Amino acid sequence: MKIKRLERNAPCWCGSGKKYKSCHLAFDDKLRRYELMGHIVPGHELIKTEKDIEGIRKSAVINIAVLDEIGEKIHAGMSTQEIDDIVMTTTSKMGGIPADLGYEGYPKSVCTSVNDEVCHGIPSKDVILKDGDIVNVDCSTILNGYFSDSSRMFLIGDVSPEKKRLCEVTKECVEIGLSYVKPWTFLGDMGSAVHQHALKNGYSVVREIGGHGCGNAFHEEPFVSYVSKPGTEMLMVPGMVFTIEPMVNMGKDGIFTDADNGWTVRTADGKPSAQWEIEVLVTEEGAEILSY
Ligand code: MF3
Ligand code: CO
């Protein structure tokens, strides 16, 4: 059994300082019941303490400010390297560290994915944003060991109605996903709602890459799919933190990774792809957005 039993009078594992019996005992019993029914349940290591949540919130203040700053400065004619420079400067000024830099050898501070780039576009002085481009800027921050992660789409100048619509629907997918974040329901309920909204609009959703637990590390369990089925995947419980970040393709869901840089993922059919990402906390009532 995944959920270990503690002695009733022992201090609770959550760090509250309270006795187990008057803190998470009933919670653990409930988790164990779901586990026995065959569901995937989070281990205690995925339940954030109040201190963790406070740390992630502060990290997210920087992440949000960096994306706001990019929103003000992004324009046609600028290189994606300039976006990287803004991320580094703004994050450092606020006392944070860009989480992307050096992550598994990633060479830059942010991901900038343009048009048919699905994710992990590498900033470069040779990539110049032009009128009509859509670009995802995916930003992640470390502050005092706590991680925040979110991304937004930016529309450069005069964007075609088709691409504009793709970006709008992708944002709606995230909002709909968020409305499904409720304790004691399943990640598959959320993922399925995201998928259905994309399909309804004639789009597809990338299957191989998804969201993730986040906060005390950059990428934690569970993997969060947006092509999942209701009543499946991990049970959501208060204290879990994860990202909602569907990659929505205008055409088919097929993707490939750039063989030269080993990072950049593109659509197989060359059609545009969009992504929005938020980081959310599951609360007793529903959800709290930590980073956006
Ligand atoms: N920010 C991305 C995510 O949403 C991860 C980027 S990892 C990097 O999970 F190494 F490519 F930067
Ligand atoms: Co993420």
Image (cartoon, rainbow, N blue to C red):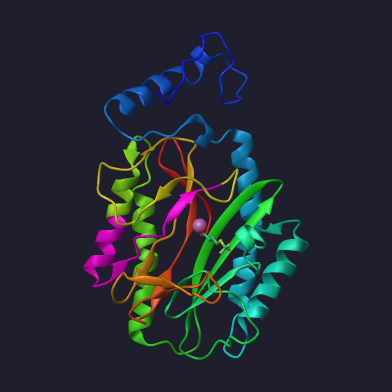
Q: Which quarter shows the N terminus? A: top left
**Residue located at (22% from left, 67% from top):** 200
Q: Which range is magenta?
A: 193-214
Instruction: Specify whether residue 178 is painted magenta.
Output: no
Q: Position of residue 259 (x, y in %)?
A: 49, 75
In this view, which residue lies farthest toward the front?
Answer: 259
Can residue 243 be seen by looking at this rendering? no
In the displayed structure, does residue 36 sit left or right of residue 46?
Answer: left
Q: Position of residue 58 (x, y in %)?
A: 66, 49
Q: Is residue 214 left or right of residue 249?
A: right
Q: 117 or 142: which is nearer to us?
A: 117
Q: Is residue 273 above or below residue 233?
A: below
Horizontally, is 6 left or right of 204 in the view? right
Query: At 39% from the left edge and 52% from the top edge, which residue is drawn?
Result: 178
**Above or below for 156 versus 100:** below
Residue at coordinates 76% horizontally, 56% vertically from top-left? 95
